[in-house]
Amino acid sequence: VCASSYERDFNRGAYVIIAFTCMFTLLSLLFGVLLSRHFIRDVTGPIERLLGAMKKAEPCDAGGSQFHRKDEIDGLVVGYNDLIGNITAANREIEDGKLAIYRLAYHDALTNLPNRNLFKAKVESDIQDGVATAMLVLMDIRSFRLINTLQGEGVGDEVLRRVGEILGGVRDETRIISRISGDEFGVWVSGTDEEW
C-alpha cells in the first residue's frame, strides 16, 4: 500500500515537530541545569564560606572570620558576626575573671605579696620535689597592735604596705616572700647554701 502525498507530508511534518520538540526540550534541560548550578552556587557559596568561618571561630578567634553581604543571607551573616563578637567578649571576661580569682586566691591585696595559700603551695611543692636545702624564716612586726591602737588602722595598713614593698624587693626565683596573716610574714628560700 502506497502512502498518499498527504500522509507523506504529514509524517514529514510530524518528524520535524518531534525533532524540534526533542531538541527544544534538551536545550531547555541543559539551560535549566546550567542556570540552576549558577543559582545554587550563589546560595551555597556564602553558606560554605560561613561554615568555614565558623570552623575558624571554634577556638573563638574572631580575627578574619567576619564578612558582610548585601543579599538574602545578610541576616544570617550579621547574626553570626554578632555571635562571634559576643563569644569573644565573653571569653575575654572569663580570662579576666580567672586572673582576678587567681589574684584574690594567691595574693595579699594590701601588700601585693603572695599570701598564705601560695606560700604553702610553694613550700609543699619544694618538699615533695626533694629540695636539697631550704630555709624558712617567719617574722612579725614588733608592737604592731600598739601602732594600730595609737595611730589607727590606716597607719597600720601603711606600715604593712611599706614592709611589703621592702620584702618584695628581694624576691627572686629561689625565694618566696609572703604575708601570712596580720603582721606576720614568711620567707622560704630553696637552693644551695652558696645562693643564700
Image (cartoon, grey):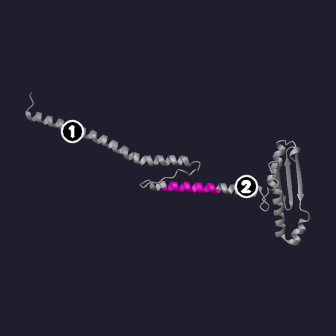
Q: Quadrant of residue 85?
A: bottom right
**Amino acid type at image mark 1:** Phe
**Amino acid type at image mark 2:** Tyr
Residue 103: assigned label = none
Indicate yes or no whether the magenta region holds residue 138. Answer: no
Q: Residue 18: give x, y in percent of width and height.
A: 20, 37
Indicate yes or no whether the magenta region holds residue 83. Answer: yes
Left or right placement of residue 107 versus residue 66 in this view: right
Q: Nearer the viewer, residue 51 or 142?
A: 142
- Separation of residues labelled 2 and 1 (CA atoms): 81 Å
Q: Residue 118: give x, y in percent of width and height.
A: 79, 53
Magenta residues: mostly which secondary structure? helix
Q: Check the image and name the residue furthest to the right.
A: 143
Left or right placement of residue 31 versus residue 161 in this view: left
Residue 20: assigned label = 1
Q: Residue at position x 67%, y 56% from top?
A: 96
Residue 102: assigned label = 2
Q: Secondary structure at mark 2?
A: helix
Please tell me how many numbered marks the rendered image carries: 2
Compare marks 2 and 1 and give the one earlier in the sequence.
1
Nearer mark to the viewer, of 2 and 1: 2
Q: Residue at position x 86%, y 55% from top?
A: 186
Q: Check the image and name the residue furthest to the top.
A: 1
Q: Residue 121: give x, y in percent of width and height.
A: 80, 50
Q: Quadrant of residue 30?
A: top left
Left or right placement of residue 93 versus residue 36 in this view: right
Give above or below for 128 relative to 74. above
Q: Nearer the viewer, residue 50 or 194?
A: 194
